[in-house]
Image (cartoon, helix red, strand yellow):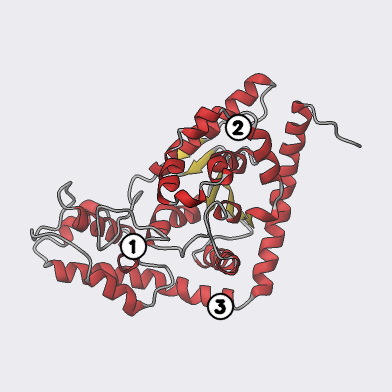
Amino acid sequence: MPKTVYSALKPTGDLQLGNYIGALNNMVKLQEDYNCIYTVADMHSITVDCVPADLRKRTYDFMALFLAIGLDPEKSILFVQSHVPQHAELAWVLNCFTQYGEARRMTQFKEKSHKNPENVNLGLFAYPTLMAADILLYNADYVPIGKDQKQHLELARTVAERFNNRFSPTFTVPDGIFNKVGAKIQNLLDPTAKMGKTDDNANGVVFLLDDADTVMRKFRRAVTDSDNRIIVAPDKPGISNLITIYSVFSGISVAETEKKFEGVSYAEFKTQVGEAVVNRLAPVRQKYNELIADKAYLNKVMKEGAEKASYIASKTLSKVYRKVGFAQYK
């Protein structure tokens, strides 16, 4: 039987190049060989301040982009997290099997608490156990993650093992899938900082729905360095970032990219990187525009995906409830 892969994206901010390279592009490839379950993680979104209307809009935007990049509801289960209440139900049980010290050590909780000290809510603190519930509900074998999510996956593994040892084997203990190329894409104007959906420096972020002129403008303004060599090197974060982007969008290796652009000016290189991105994203944007105008179809995909996910999740949750001692009527 094919292994199960679970992945989720949180609809805070607009999807950008880093999401595409680090997650979405690989999600499409994985659905050919695995049982894939992909989620728009709207429940995670409310751990920080957000405008309800924006959250609803982005939930549809994300689902439309999932489909536009090539995720197939016939091959993968695509759904919205809040449409499957078992996520919240299992999260409560897992809260009771997670130690306070384990949750307190989470780096992202510390960072977000420091960044938004006026809104350090319990949901933000318990975010990792909801993430664990997301994964464990479907007995996922693999979870594609970036380095910044490794700590959360480790907690999910710890909680799964603790539950299995206390009762009996219940959850699959998941492993991570880490990208070898493009795991972390940097901001074009500040190559020391990660490109993010909610980045304050948006002029250095290429969003998937940016038009061609905007994409080209952002790449032409990308920060490089005083050297003129197009190579990957620790002291050349800007050029290294652009080489990674070109490699992914052109389909050639980093080494081949370095060889191809040997002796080429930075200005010309940045133009060609921008063109490679524009050419790949143009059909995605066109397909997105068609899908976002068809809310009935998006609702159908969400509903059918939620039904498939609920069927799997309810079986896992029923087993968990029975093991912890909850009485279940028949």
User: Which residue in the structure is indicated by mark 2?
Assistant: 172
Residue 318 at what x, y percent from top left?
77, 36
Q: Quadrant of residue 136?
A: top right
User: Which residue in the structure is indicated by mark 1?
Assistant: 249
Residue 97 at what x, y percent from top left?
62, 28
Q: Which is nearer the N-term, disc 1 or disc 2?
A: 2
Tell me which residue sits at (69%, 22%) in the image.
168
Are there few (<14), some (14-19), or many (20+) residues within 10 Å of tag 3?
Answer: few
Badge count: 3
User: Which residue in the structure is indicated by mark 3?
Assistant: 290
Residue nearest the viewer, comparing 189 with 80: 189
Amino acid at circle 2: Thr
Residue 314 at what x, y percent from top left?
75, 43
Q: Using the numbered discs, state the Cα–Cα distance from disc 1 to disc 3 in whole angstroms.
A: 23 Å
- Above or below, 174 against 111 in this view is above
Amino acid at circle 1: Phe
Amino acid at circle 3: Glu
